[in-house]
Image (spheres, rainbow, N blue to C red):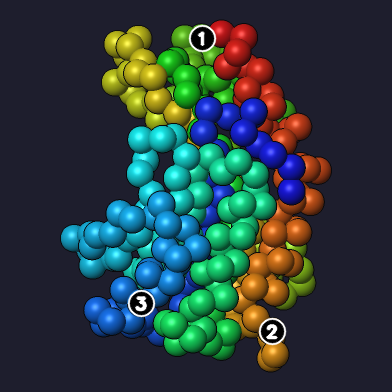
Amino acid sequence: MQSYESIADDYYINMHLNTEMQLPASRETVLGFFERIQKSYPTMRNFYTRESGDFVLEEDKEQGHYRWVTIESRRICSGYVNPPTPEAALEQHNLVLDLIPYMLSVSPLDCEALDLMLGFDFVYRGNHDALIAEALGFTPALESLLNIPGAQPLNFEPSITMTLDEACRLQARLMVETRTNAYHVRRREFPEEPISVFFTVRQYGSLPVQSSFKEAMEVIAEKTAELMEQHVVEQILKPLQLAISAK
């Protein structure tokens, strides 16, 4: 998987495993799991519980790049913000996936969905929706809307979900998220906020017999790298980067 650090202001690679059954939440089990992760990544020393009951272990965020892992009621997440290489993030995710069967009693049969998500933040002070329209364009059927006198985009967040197999078990989703609202447009005052692009490849359902979470993630990561290179970097990310740099 190619490096993406030069494309966006921030980028992150996250893994999410959704389970059918409730995850264990006992003190001994949770602490034992996070202590094992900390042995591999000693700088992950910030541990806390959210009001929702989620357990979090993370590195200090001030350095601009950091790892984090969470245990929710029915979801395990692992993330790396601004990793030096995508492989560094995948190594962390694979460690989590290796540990959960025997430390959290999560079976491949218990898998509701496993996904890999790449996120990209582009900081921009201006009308996010207008910039997206300029950088990515409208479909021909919608282009005439921009020719309405006095009209300008107010909510334009392209999103598409595709199935990658006939059974619809392997899916990919591309989503753009803007943060401009009517108040900003009306007052012509735009805060410096990020435009986010998310690309996710997700495998639904229990894993095949004799298959492991790590093996499933290898397939997902390979498909993600292929789709990113062929359909996302040059078509979405770089046009957005160029449109911002031209302002």
- Structural crowding at the residue carrying mark 3, measured as other residues with C-alpha within 10 Å and reported as few (<14), some (14–19) or many (≥20): some
Give the labeled residue for mark 3: 32
Q: Does residue 51 sit above or below 34 in this rendering? A: above
Q: What is the CA distance from the residue labelled 1 to the residue labelled 2?
A: 58 Å
Give the labeled residue for mark 2: 211
Dot 1: what SS?
Answer: loop
Q: What is the CA distance from the residue labelled 3 to the residue labelled 2?
A: 25 Å
Residue closer to the observer: 238 or 102: 102
151 sits left or right of 226 in the view: left
Badge 3 or badge 2: first in the primary sequence: 3
Badge 1 or badge 2: first in the primary sequence: 1
Q: What is the CA distance from the residue labelled 1 to the residue labelled 3?
A: 63 Å
Residue 244 visible, this orientation? yes
244 sits left or right of 231 in the view: left
Q: Does residue 104 sit above or below 56 in this rendering? A: below
Type of amino acid under label 3: Gly
Q: Residue at x 63, y 23 (%)?
A: 241
Question: Depth-wise, is mark 1 or mark 3 nearer the camera?
Answer: 3
Question: Depth-wise, is mark 1 or mark 2 nearer the camera?
Answer: 2
Residue closer to the observer: 137 or 169: 169
**In the figure, residue 244 lies in which quadrant?**
top right
Q: Residue at x 66, y 36 (%)?
A: 4
Residue 145 visible, this orientation? no
Give the labeled residue for mark 1: 149
Looking at this view, name the residue that lies furthest to the left. Answer: 51
Q: Position of residue 238 (x, y in %)?
A: 69, 27
Q: Position of residue 76 (x, y in %)?
A: 44, 68
